[in-house]
Image: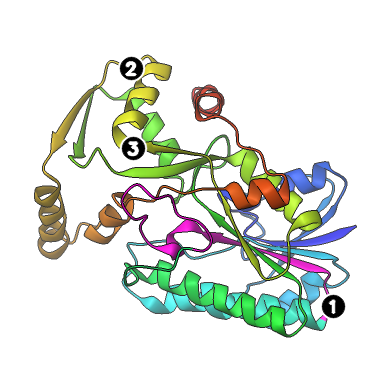
C-alpha cells in the first residue's frame, strides 16, 4: 500500500517514514533536498524532489497513495518574517489537502502542536475541548491554528482528515532545531554548570517519540474525520524534569537559577544591540509557558498508549550517549 509523507527529513517525519517502511508500506516522501543527510534510508522509501508550496510536485509524489501524513512545518521562532510561517504552514497545508482531495486519498493525518490551544489554565490540563484563552504568542502558533482550520474546512468537502496535536517530543532520532528536550538532556549530562531562568514551577507535557509514531498509525485505522487528538505523555514541572534527568544521567551539574525577567531583558538587549539571536524573548516565553495536557481522548478512541517518562528517558539517554 502506498502512502505519502512530508517532513521526512525532520525529527517526527523521519521516524514515521522508517516505521511505515518497516511495516511494508511503500512510502513516497516529498523533500526539498534529495541529497540531505537526514533522508530516511529504506528499500520501501522512494524520495521525490519538490516542495509543499509547489502543487505540481505534490501531485506527482502523491499519485497512487492511499494515505497522507503531513508532518512538515516551519517552526523557527527566531524568524521575524511571518511569510515563512504562512507559506509553509498554511499555503503548503492547503496544497497538500487540495491534492489529496483531487487524488481521492482515503485519509489525511495532519501533525499539529499542542501550542495551538495556548497555555493551560492553573492546574487544569489542556483537552481537545479547551477554547484558547489568550492571543497567539507567535507566528508559529497562529499559522498552525490557521492550518488546522484549513484541515477542518476540507473535511466539509468530503476529505477524511485527522489532526494530531503533539506535546513536547523527546527520544531517539534526528537532532533538529525543535528537539529541545534531547538537547537539554545532553547539556545536563555533559556540563558542569547550567544557568537557567527561575520559573521552575512551569509544567509541560512530554511525549516519547515511539508513542507519537504509534499514534499516527493508530489514526489511520481509528481516527475520526474532523477530530483532534492530543498526543502526549506525562505532565512534569521543570523542577521535577531537571531532577529526573540529573538522576538518570548521574550528573553532578550545578543549576544556577536567574530571575526570569532579568534573563528576558538581557536577551532583548543582546538581540537589539549585538544582533545575537540564539534564543529570543519569544522563544523563551514559548519554553516557559504552562502546557499540561491530557491524552484521554486518544487513549479512549485510538487505543493510544503512553510510555512512562522514566522508561522513555532511559532509552533516550542510552541513545544520546552513543
Q: Is residue 123 magenta?
A: yes
Q: Is residue 259 above or below residue 273?
A: above
Marked residue nearer the N-terminal end (2 or 3): 3
Q: Which residue is mark 3?
A: 237
Spot occupied by residue 211 in the image (x, y as percentages of width and height): 63, 41
- C-alpha distance separating marks 2 and 3: 19 Å
Spot occupied by residue 5 in the image (x, y as percentages of width and height): 71, 61
Q: Secondary structure at mark 2?
A: loop
Mark 1 or 2, closer to the camera? 1
Q: Is residue 280 above or below residue 312?
A: below
**In front of the other: 166 or 25:** 166
Give the total number of marks visible in the rendering: 3
Q: Which residue is mark 2?
A: 251
State the extent of the magenta-drawn residues as a range.
103-129
In the rendered view, how is the structure colored?
A: rainbow
Residue 64 visible from this viewpoint: yes
Please give the label number shown on residue 212. Answer: none
Spot occupied by residue 25 in the image (x, y as percentages of width and height): 86, 51
- C-alpha distance separating marks 1 and 2: 53 Å
Q: Which residue is mark 1?
A: 104
Q: Secondary structure at mark 1?
A: loop
Marked residue nearer the N-terminal end (3 or 1): 1
Mark 2 or 3, closer to the camera? 3
Disc 2 crowd rating (10 Å Cα; few below 14, some 14-19, many 20+) is some
The reply to whether discs 3 and 1 touch (Cβ–Cβ < 8 Å) is: no
Marked residue nearer the N-terminal end (1 or 2): 1
Spot occupied by residue 11 in the image (x, y as percentages of width and height): 57, 48
Q: Secondary structure at mark 3?
A: strand
The reply to whether discs 1 and 2 touch (Cβ–Cβ < 8 Å) is: no
Residue 53 visible from this viewpoint: no
Q: Is residue 291 magenta?
A: no
**In-image side of 145 versus 212 (left or right):** left
Amino acid at each position: 500500500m502506498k502512502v505519502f509523507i512530508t517532513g521526512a527529513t525532520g525529527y517526527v517525519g523521519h521516524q514515521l517514514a522508517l516505521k511505515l517502511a518497516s511495516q511494508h508500506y511503500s512510502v513516497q516522501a516529498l523533500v526539498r533536498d534529495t541529497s540531505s543527510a537526514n533522508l530516511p534510508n529504506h528499500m520501501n522509501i522512494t524520495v521525490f524532489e519538490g516542495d509543499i508550496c509547489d502543487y505540481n510536485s505534490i501531485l506527482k509524489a502523491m499519485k497512487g497513495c492511499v494515505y497522507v501524513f503531513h508532518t512538515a512545518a516551519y517552526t523557527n521562532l527566531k524568524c521575524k518574517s511571518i511569510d515563512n510561517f504562512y507559506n509553509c504552514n498554511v499555503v503548503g497545508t492547503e496544497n497538500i489537502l487540495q491534492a489529496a482531495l483531487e487524488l481521492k486519498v482515503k485519509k489525511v493525518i495532519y501533525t499539529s502542536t499542542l501550542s495551538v490551544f495556548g497555555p493551560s489554565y492553573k492546574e487544569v490540563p489542556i483537552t481537545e475541548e479547551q477554547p484558547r484563552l489568550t492571543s497567539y504568542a507567535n507566528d508559529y502558533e497562529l499559522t498552525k491554528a490557521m492550518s488546522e482550520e484549513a484541515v477542518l474546512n476540507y473535511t466539509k468537502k468530503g476529505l477524511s482528515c485527522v489532526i494530531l496535536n503533539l506535546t513536547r517530543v523527546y527520544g531517539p532520532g534526528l537532532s533538529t532545531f525543535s528537539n529541545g528536550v534531547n538537547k537539554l538532556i545532553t547539556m545536563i549530562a555533559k556540563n558542569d554548570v547550567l544557568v537557567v531562568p527561575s520559573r521552575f514551577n512551569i509544567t509541560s507535557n512530554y511525549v516519547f517519540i515511539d508513542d507519537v509514531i504509534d499514534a499516527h498509525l493508530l489514526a489511520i485505522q481509528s481516527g475520526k474525520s474532523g477530530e483532534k487528538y492530543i498526543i502526549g505523555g506525562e505532565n512534569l514541572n521543570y523542577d521535577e524534569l531537571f531532577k529526573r534527568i540529573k538522576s538518570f544521567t548521574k550528573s553532578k551539574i550545578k543549576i544556577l537559577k536567574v530571575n526570569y525577567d532579568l534573563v528576558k531583558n538581557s536577551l532583548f538587549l543582546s538581540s537589539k544591540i549585538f544582533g545575537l539571536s540564539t534564543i529570543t524573548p519569544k522563544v523563551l516565553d514559548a519554553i516557559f509557558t504552562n502546557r499540561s495536557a491530557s491524552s484521554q481522548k486518544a487513549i479512549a478512541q485510538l487505543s493510544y498508549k503512553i510510555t512512562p517518562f522514566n522508561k522513555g528517558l532511559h532509552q533516550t539517554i542510552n541513545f544520546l550517549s552513543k
